[in-house]
Image (cartoon, rainbow, N blue to C red):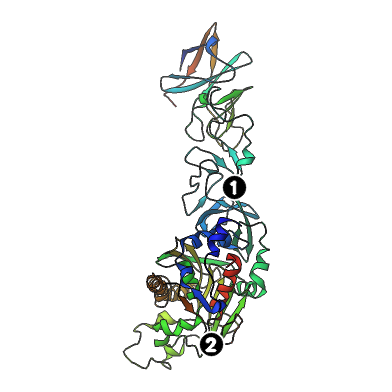
Amino acid sequence: MSDVELQAQRIEWPKEGVSRVPFEIYTNDALYESEQDLLFKGPIWNFVGVDVEIPAVGDFKTNFVGDTPVVVVKSSADSYSAFVNRCAHRGSTLCYEKTGNRDAFTCVYHNWSYDLEGNLKTVAFHKGVRGKGGLPDDFRTCDHNLQKLRVQSLCGLLFVSFDEDAPELETFLGPKMCAHIQRIFSKKIRILGTFSQHMHNNWKLYMENVKDSYHASLLHLFFTTFKLNRLSMQGGLILDGDGGHHISYSKMATDAGGGTDYESGGLRAQNDEFALHDNRILKSWPEFDDGVTHAIQGIFPNLIVQQIQNSLALRLLIPRGVNGCELVWIMFGYESDTQEETDIRVALSNLVGPAGLVSMEDGVIGSFVQRAIVGNQGRETVLEMGGRTVESQESRVSEASVRGFWQAYRKYMRL
Amino acid sequence: MSWLNVARLSDLAPDYPTACSVEGHRIALYLVDGAVYGTSNICTHQFALLSDGYHEDGVVECPLHQGRFDVRTGKALCSPLTIDLATYEVDVRGDEVWVCIQGDGR
């Protein structure tokens, strides 16, 4: 058994199973290191970007798998490559830009140069100078390629895996999750903007928050004040992938002609003090035939696909040490959108992000937990809303998908 | 245009280019089957001296990224090169190597 596994196994899971989570899970440094190996580099698929971000051969994007820096590049007309963003020579960062176009990747340190697939092509002064110095005659460049990752895609979403034994991407996602991705990404998307926020909490607290449909109408007063999302609305939870993936969805009564009851004056907050002077921010139109107006999909371990009315986004959560994480947002619409539709999406994006009228609380609630669980003396969190098991539910007054996250987490972490 | 005596033939070696610097021109000289050829000493890809590179059978390999030029024509032979190398007319007079310089340093 490796040291990493031994360290992870020092945490003893409560006998109640996934209805309890030891607080140490968010604070243990050794566990954080184990997560990098067993989870993020384990037999899973990690989202890294969208095909429209790197449309031309040589276009690349840098990102992270767990906290390991990676590069994903369009390496030919019909293929993508990915590798660790680290020169095979001395381990220097190879690629500093977030995006760009290259015909080769050359390290600034000693000018070792790699092709778009990560193969070492040239070594500066490999023959030395005037016959002195240089590499030994038996040095083979093919033994010193970049550390390569597998790349697979679904509807333009690019995923990578460190593990040769990871199942095919669509098997990892499962049919329910694939169907939901196909629902959102059936048309070519257009990225409206990206941004990221740092949060002062362990990454898992944010993923739990995403999967916790119970808190939405309690923590997010904007929703209830303006009657946008109540737990009494029709909706439910769909779980898959050992419980690690989920979709939380709901249907808001929406006039087919456009505009909400709120806008027409039919729905008003009980306290007249709480009214928006300019309600264009809430304008939306029914986008999908299934009537679902809100759908949050969590792909294990750290991707979120967001549909909040017409606000569409991908969110990737990057762990930044045991006490921090960075949430990267990709806001998008479709190439076929009219200007009016684009304007509505941009206006609705006020709901999300670090200062979003709704997401603002999600960005800080994890740190409220993180600072309170210091010195927790082996205590644990309680997850019993909607029972103690992991299954799809008709009600969103449930923590089933949070329990599902822990079920999958325990499997990969061998806890 | 002027002809300048820049090197001794007996100092040239077949495996490695010889660097010389005259009137702002940085020149690399090559010995190929007894004949002498001259090119710019600076790679067209990124700044590197070809005289630090390796020469074999009329082809010089840049030390930095292993771009190769034909020293007789200056032609770029492979990636990452996209621009040919400037060449100089060379005349060997006994042991003296003369190079034809045109205009200012390039």
Q: Relative to residue B43, is residue A145 depicted above or below?
A: below
Provide residue B73's location: percent of width, then percent of height: 59, 25
Callouts 2 and 1 close, C-beta under 8 Å: no
Residues behind callouts 2 and 1 on a single chain: yes
Query: Would residue A29 be visible to someone looking at this image?
Result: yes
Which of the 4 image quadrants contains residue A290? bottom right
- For the point 59% across and 49% down, which residue is it? A147
- Pointer 1 residue: A116
Extreme residue in the top direction = B94
Task: Give neighbour class at mark 1: few <14, some 14-19, many 20+ (Cα, 10 Å).
Answer: many
Q: Relative to residue A364, is residue A266 depicted above or below?
A: below
Provide residue A77's location: percent of width, then percent of height: 64, 53
Task: Give neighbour class at mark 2: few <14, some 14-19, many 20+ (Cα, 10 Å).
Answer: few
- For the point 49% across and 88% down, which residue is it? A231
- Pointer 2 residue: A256
Q: Is residue A128 left or right of residue A374?
A: right
Amino acid of disc 2: Ala
User: Which of the chains bears the disc numbered 2?
Assistant: A
